[in-house]
Image (cartoon, rainbow, N blue to C red):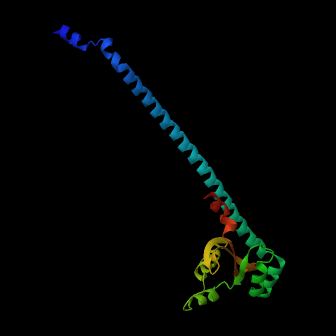
Amino acid sequence: MAGMKNAGARVSTGALSPLLPLLSLVCVLLAAWFGWSAWERYQDESRRSRVQAVRDTAVSNTGQAIAAERTRIAAQLARADVKAALARGDRRAAGRALTQGWSDARDGAVYAPDLQSVYGGLDAPKPPAGAYGRLAALEAALTEDRPVARVVRDSAGTRFAVAAPARSAGQLVGVAYASLPLERVAGDIQTAA
């Protein structure tokens, strides 16, 4: 019986000869498929790395641009003409002076710390465009007690807004606000897209 098992297990190489070309072809096809899969995976990883690098650069540049504009509103509030207007209690003049020399800045205003003039505008049957976004930026500046940045929508479209507490002789006398084109800070993100 042991002899029968061995006899059945033996296969002559002559019987496999016709299958060798087919077996070789299958091996070549498998090798090609594995190679192609590896190449595709490598390409995908390379694309992902490039996308991540572009994304990281865009986010970093946007963060720096936002920080620069928050610093800029603080610098504008420190200007002599703005400080003088705040010391006189002339928030309207301080608001006009706030955006002088600040390219693309508009809507410069200094509001009373109680924000009643802004809240009052919300009572209208149709509040002015951007009133809620402006109010959110102003409230954030008061709450955080530092310059803040927000994206708001107003009559001119989507804008980048900055707001900061305005002080005179160490006392809070108002909240400053200015808006800039969104491209000023989001240009890198739009370019990356």
Viewer-nearest residue: 6 or 163: 6
Name the outermost residue toward the right.
80
Q: Residue at x 70, y 67 (%)?
A: 184
In the image, 177: left or right of 25?
A: right
Depth check: give the residue in front, 29 or 123.
29
Report x, y in % for residue 32.
47, 31
For residue 39, side relative to residue 113 (left or right): left
Q: What residue do we see at 74% from left, 86% from top? A: 91
Residue 143: percent from the left, percent from the top? 61, 75
Q: Is residue 143 visible in this depiction of the protein?
A: no
Camera-side residue of 9 and 161: 9
Report how many numbered discs are placed on residues in the image. Answer: 0
What is the x, y in percent for residue 43? 55, 42
Query: In this picture, is 117 found above or below 40?
Result: below
Q: Quadrant of residue 153?
A: bottom right
**Drawn side of residue 48 relative to residue 60, left or right:** left
Residue 25 vertical position relative to residue 161 in the rendered view, above or below: above
Task: Assign the N terminus to one quadrant of the image.
Answer: top left
> What residue sits 71% from the left and 83% below the top?
110
Q: Is residue 143 left or right of residue 167?
A: left
Instruction: Give the quarter of the image for residue 102.
Output: bottom right
Q: Is residue 131 visible?
A: yes
Q: Quadrant of the C terminus?
A: bottom right
Given the current orientation, which residue lies at the most extreme left position? 1
Residue situated in front as seen by the camera: 130 or 3: 3
Image-quadrant location for residue 142: bottom right
